[in-house]
Amino acid sequence: MAIKNNFLNRRSFILGSSLAFTGVAKVFSKNTANKSHIVVLGGGWGGLSAAKTLRLMNKNCKITLIEKNKKFVSCPMSNWVIGQLINMKNITFDYKKFKKNNDIDIIFDQVTSINVEKKIISTSEITLKYDKLILSPGIKLDFSDIDGFSGSPNNSIFSAWKAGNETQNFSNEIRNIENGDNIIISIPLSPYRCPPGPYERTSLIADYIKKNKINAKVIVLDANQKIVSKGLLFKKAWNELYKNIIFYYSDSQIRAIAYKENKVFTDFEEYHYKTLNIIPPQKAPSLLFKAGLIEKGRNWAPVNPYDFTSKYYKDIYIIGDSTDASSVGSVPKSGYVAYSMGKVAGLASFYHLLEKEPPAPSMINTCYSLVSQTEGISVSAVYKFNKKKNKIVTVANASGLSPKRSNLIALNAWDWALAIWKDMLT
Ligand SMILES: Cc1cc2nc3c(=O)[nH]c(=O)nc-3n(C[C@H](O)[C@H](O)[C@H](O)COP(=O)(O)OP(=O)(O)OC[C@H]3O[C@@H](n4cnc5c(N)ncnc54)[C@H](O)[C@@H]3O)c2cc1C
């Protein structure tokens, strides 16, 4: 009953995402679909959204979600923890309501292999057979190109690019900044998870330094030629608010580290740090390579952008940050996009189980960033499927940047997080 009510409540939302589903009632009772087993890997932004969407459409099929962590810790808003605005409790949730309200089995374990031919997914403890498999495992952080990195003393270098203990440790370091300290943030070449994320992090650390009148610097070593998202808005905020705090260097990739001297090296310069935040290059997790879902020499999983099925296996859907933008189209690696892809894949799997063609997808993304405790900036886009290009494309005149930073956008950012967490996790 709870599911039925939920379905009605959410129906308008899904319709609002242009995922029209006509004739649902007629096909709903098909036995094969109802007896199917759909396994979802990843209880993050894509996986939760996909599992829930499928459940809203079909209340009888068996859905199993496999997630290695018992708690969901949100990357969106984790920069706010590092900037001392909120704490870990505010971004940490359990899966109890999600499991109960949606009648989805959850297995807390690490998936170790996928046999795509036999349609089997395994952890070290269990093996499950699936009819459809939805994969949203996020990213792998790759530090291998940084000379000397492997000698890292415990807990002293943070990426904090997967929210969790490192977010807390980095936040503790920021709380203890002292006069004369340098905080270095390094940004990898795009594409990486959350294009504006490193710049928001920089802003919030600078805001904390400024508010507390500490004589410290944030040095940003960006491997890209320029700020990759909301560049003009970030630059304006940094010039006006943090002139002697933020020092930004483009085209500056960290090549080596000397821990003993607290130094990092780019191709031309060396920098001394007190706190080092390396956001390393990223790729899809190794599991997807091992399963044969990614070609040698590529970093991300190719998919059909109409329904997010794998380019190689029609019963496997891949969504979220793991997907290859060159096959999907011009969407960023964001939580909101992963959540939108989850809706598309959840609905597509429902149609495919009925051996029907799903409707053409449409997705949305809004990405908020704080530039200080009280002011934010945002970028929004609406996407649709373009048949001729066989890609997801941005809808003209329905997308854009906020004209300037504002207090209202900062408030909207928090409201967005509360709303989307509630939708995913209950
Ligand atoms: C600092 C920061 C700020 C951000 N801010 C925003 C923002 O404001 N707005 C926004 O839209 N996006 C934001 N993002 C981006 C967003 O977090 C990601 O794009 C999103 O999490 C991608 O969703 P996903 O489902 O692909 O991966 P994830 O959310 O990472 O989910 C993957 C899940 O799979 C699990 N998993 C992986 N491998 C296995 C395995 N082998 N076995 C079992 N479980 C496994 C993981 O534990 C994880 O829970 C931010 C990211 C960062 C780092």
Image: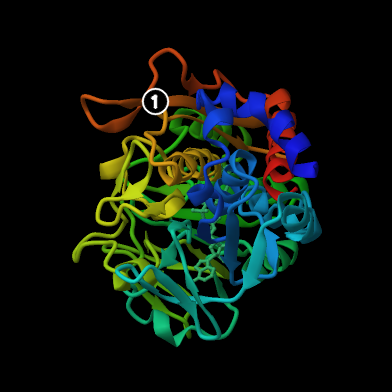
Q: Is residue 329 left or right of residue 179?
A: left
Please tell me whether mark 1 sits on a helix, a strand or a loop. strand
At 68% from the left edge and 45% from the top edge, which residue is drawn?
Answer: 207
Residue 327 visible in rendering: yes
Quadrant where ligand 1 appears = bottom right
Q: Eyeballing the image, is 229 above or below 248?
A: above
Q: Where is residue 170 shown, x and y percent of the image?
A: 65, 66
* Residue 79 or residue 56, whichever sits in front: 56
At 41% from the left edge and 40% from the top edge, which residue is drawn?
Answer: 227
At 39% from the left edge and 19% from the top edge, which residue is drawn?
Answer: 395
Which quadrant is the N terminus positioned in? top right
Packing grade of label 1 (10 A; few <14, some 14-19, many >=20) is some
Q: Where is residue 61 shown, x and y percent of the image?
A: 58, 53
* Residue 100 or residue 298, whichever sits in front: 100
Q: Where is residue 236 shown, x and y percent of the image?
A: 52, 29
* Residue 31 or residue 209, whichever sits in front: 31
Residue 246 visible in rendering: no
Q: Quadrant of residue 312?
A: bottom left
Q: Amino acid at mark 1?
A: Lys
Q: Is residue 160 left or right of residue 92?
A: left
Q: Eyeballing the image, is 133 above or below 52?
A: below
Q: Where is residue 239 shown, x and y percent of the image?
A: 54, 34
Identify residue for label 1.
384
Q: Quadrant of residue 327?
A: top left
Residue ranking furthest to the top: 397
Q: Eyeballing the image, is 10 above or below 421?
A: above
At 65% from the left edge and 23% from the top edge, which residue is drawn?
Answer: 12
Q: Quadrant of residue 264?
A: bottom left
Instruction: Please name the colour scheme applied to the rendered image.
Output: rainbow
